[in-house]
Structure formats: C-alpha cells, structure tokens
Amino acid sequence: SSSEFARYPRPVGTMGNSCCAGGESVTAEVTGPEAGRSTSANPAQVGGANRASAGGGKKAGGLCSVPDELIEKYKGMKMKRQLRYVVCTINMESMEVVMEKEGAPSATYDDFAACLPEKECRYGLVDFEYKTSDGRPQSRVVFFFWTPDACENPKSKFVFAQCKEILKKNLEGIAFEVQATERSELTPDKVLEKVAGMHAKSCTYG
C-alpha cells in the first residue's frame, strides 16, 4: 500500500543509541523455559508467549502462533513510525513468536544489526531510511530473516524457516525481505539493493 512508501524522517538530532548500547530501546531477553516473559520496566511494551496465549495470538497453519501485540506494533511502525525496529524469536516449547527487543524511533539500523545474536536465528522488522540521488528522504519497512551459518541447532533453523511465511502472512503488506546468513549480508548497501532495486547505487543510507 502507499503507506509503505515515501515517508519523511523525524527531525535531525533524534538519532540515538541502541538497546545494545544503552539507548532508548526497550529490551526483553528471552532464555530457557521462561522464554517470552518481558523483563522490561514496562511490560506493556514487550509481549511474549504467555501474553500471546492469554491475549488470543493469531494462529495460521497450526505450526506457530503470532501475538496480536506484534501485529499492532508492526502497524504502528508502518503507519505512524512508532518504532525503529522489532526483533523476534520463537519459543520452541509453545511454538509462539515472541517479541524479544524493540528499538525506539531514535535508534538506527546499525543498532538493529548489532542486536542480532551470532549463533541464533531471529526475525526482524526495520523502518529503514535512505535518500535518493536528488536528496529526497525515503523509508521502507523491511522484514529480516536471520539464520546465521554459525547456528549449530538444525531444529531451530528448520522451525524458523517453516514459521516465516506464517509470520509474514499475519504482517500484511510486507513488500521487502532480506535473508542473511552472515554479517556481510546485513550491510546497509545490501538492504538498499532490496528496497531501491536498480537505483540502489545512486541512493545513500541514512
């Protein structure tokens, strides 16, 4: 839809640090049997498997469920630019997609990339900003599928691959996807190739 296309960025001077660097992002780490519980000071901002079960997370295909809260976060990112990024994992016990980390509007794409673990799979949504050759600011919401070569858990790779399309179907309007298995595939130039196509070389990140 047209809402996914050119949108003007926020005022200069609002860029900040990431959740990984102690910035304004909201973070909830997910580990072990407690996966999905928010450790944020504000649990209303980060949802998990328990909330998805209690709040009626959507199911599609029966393989995994997607929490309604994530769908609303995506809409807020796409329509109102309320977040820079969202990082998601899967609770392997409940087979539910879990929101793990969020980046405030002041965060950057580099902050998002730095939050992806070296040896674990993740999904991501990023409001990616760039400029055209004539200096016009643009932004696109991009879906990321991170399956690092260093991941030693074949079950995790399989489950993430199988649930990817289910997640995307629940996030209506996803037009751009980046699949990466190593850091070199996460550079801003690689993302520009996806969102700007043949015009990527004349565009600049940021």
Image (cartoon, rainbow, N blue to C red):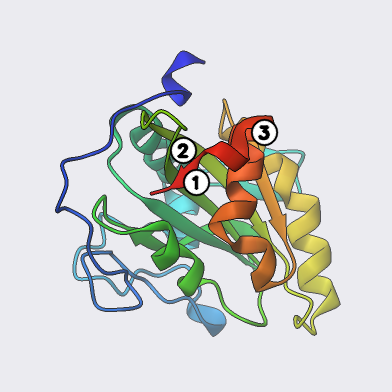
Q: Which of pointers 2 and 1 indicates the residue nearer the eye?
A: 2
Residue projecting furthest to the top: 2
Disc 1 marks a residue whose amino acid type is Pro
Q: Which of 167/179 is in front?
A: 179
Residue 175 lies, with reference to residue 201, above or below; the image says: above
Disc 3 marks a residue whose amino acid type is Gly
Q: How many marks?
A: 3
Identify the residue shown where x is 14% and y is 53%.
Answer: 13
Identify the residue shown where x is 35% and y is 69%.
Answer: 38
Residue 32 image position (x, y, % from top left): 55, 84
Residue 24 image position (x, y, % from top left): 21, 65
Q: Which of pointers 3 and 2 indicates the residue nearer the eye?
A: 3
Identify the residue shown where x is 82% and y is 73%.
Answer: 155
Disc ID at residue 67: 1
Q: Quadrant of residue 9?
A: top left
Q: Which residue is mark 2?
A: 71
Q: Which of 193/149 is in front?
A: 193
Disc ID at residue 197: 3
> How much space separates mark 2 and mark 1, taking CA atoms?
7 Å
Identify the residue shown where x is 58% and y is 44%.
Answer: 192
Check contact, mark 1 vs mark 3: CB within 8 A.
no
Q: Earlier in the sequence, mark 1 or mark 3?
A: 1
Left/right placement of residue 151 relative to residue 16 reads: right
Q: Quadrant of residue 160?
A: bottom right
* Disc 3, SS: helix
Q: Is residue 59 visible?
A: no
Check contact, mark 2 vs mark 1: CB within 8 A.
yes
Disc 2 marks a residue whose amino acid type is Ile
Left/right placement of residue 173 relative to residue 48 reads: right
Residue 195 image position (x, y, % from top left): 59, 36
Residue 184 image position (x, y, % from top left): 67, 69
